[in-house]
Image (spheres, grey):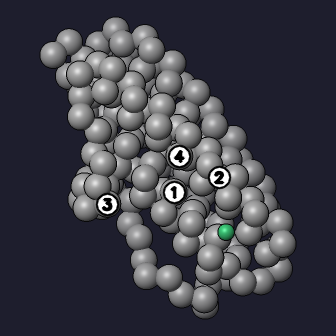
Amino acid sequence: MVYEKTQIVLNQAVADLSKAASIVHQTHWYMRGSGFFYLHPKMDELMDELNETLDIVSERLITIGGAPYSTLKEFDEHSKLVEEVGSYDKSMTERLEKLADVYAYLSDLFQEGLEISDEEGDNPSNGIFSDAQDAVQKTLWMLQAEIGRPSGL
Ligand SMILES: [Fe+2]
């Protein structure tokens, strides 16, 4: 395989983007408190964006001969993101902090993807990781701004 290491990091992104979308969905359902009216629909937008990236990453992986994870079990086993059972007793700030951690993790993973795909000369995957990192860093900035902090990048 020409892009062996790139395939591995693309599949890692498949697992993590799937789990990230699940975490955002939980936030959409369980949030309570000030900001609900705009944050609840905002989570739909974030999910759509993650799922769009997931599809692009997954199809690039197939294009270069790989086999994306495609079951909930595989996503859970391979993702490094940690889920918790839903509960209503978290503040909006705690929820956004958790999401900021998720997006910071994705940004780091995409950095790894950028370096590996560059090393293997897989330019299309490199472009995908670059676009994906741009999107998650922008969301990270917005999440941090909502809780009154700098982006942290
Ligand atoms: Fe909904």
In 3D space, how far apart are the residues under numbered discs 1 and 2 (Cα atoms)?
Answer: 8 Å
Q: Is residue 96 left or right of residue 116?
A: right
> Is residue 12 visible in the rendered structure shown here?
yes
Residue displayed at 62% across by 32% down: 134
Give amino acid for label 3.
Answer: Leu
Q: Which residue is mark 4?
A: 51
Q: Which residue is mark 2?
A: 46
- Do the residues under discs 4 and 3 have CB atoms within 8 angstroms? no
| On-image quarter of the N terminus | top left
Query: Nearer the viewer's eye, disc 3 or disc 1?
Result: 3
**Quadrant of the rendered structure where residue 100 is?**
bottom right
Residue displayed at 29% across by 55% down: 71
In 3D space, how far apart are the residues under numbered discs 3 and 1 (Cα atoms)?
Answer: 12 Å
Q: Secondary structure at mark 4?
A: helix
| On-image quarter of the C terminus | top right
Q: Which residue is mark 3?
A: 72
**Upstream in the sequence, badge 4 or badge 3?**
4
Residue 121, given in percent of the width and then of the height, sits at 34, 9
113 lies above or below 52: above
Residue displayed at 31% across by 60% down: 72
In 3D space, how far apart are the residues under numbered discs 4 and 3 (Cα atoms)?
Answer: 14 Å
Give amino acid for label 1.
Answer: Ala
Q: Nearer the viewer, residue 71 or 109?
A: 71
Give amino acid for label 4.
Answer: Asn
**Upstream in the sequence, badge 3 or badge 1?**
1
**Quadrant of the rendered structure where residue 25 is?**
bottom right
Residue 140, given in percent of the width and then of the height, sits at 65, 49
Q: Which residue is mark 1?
A: 21
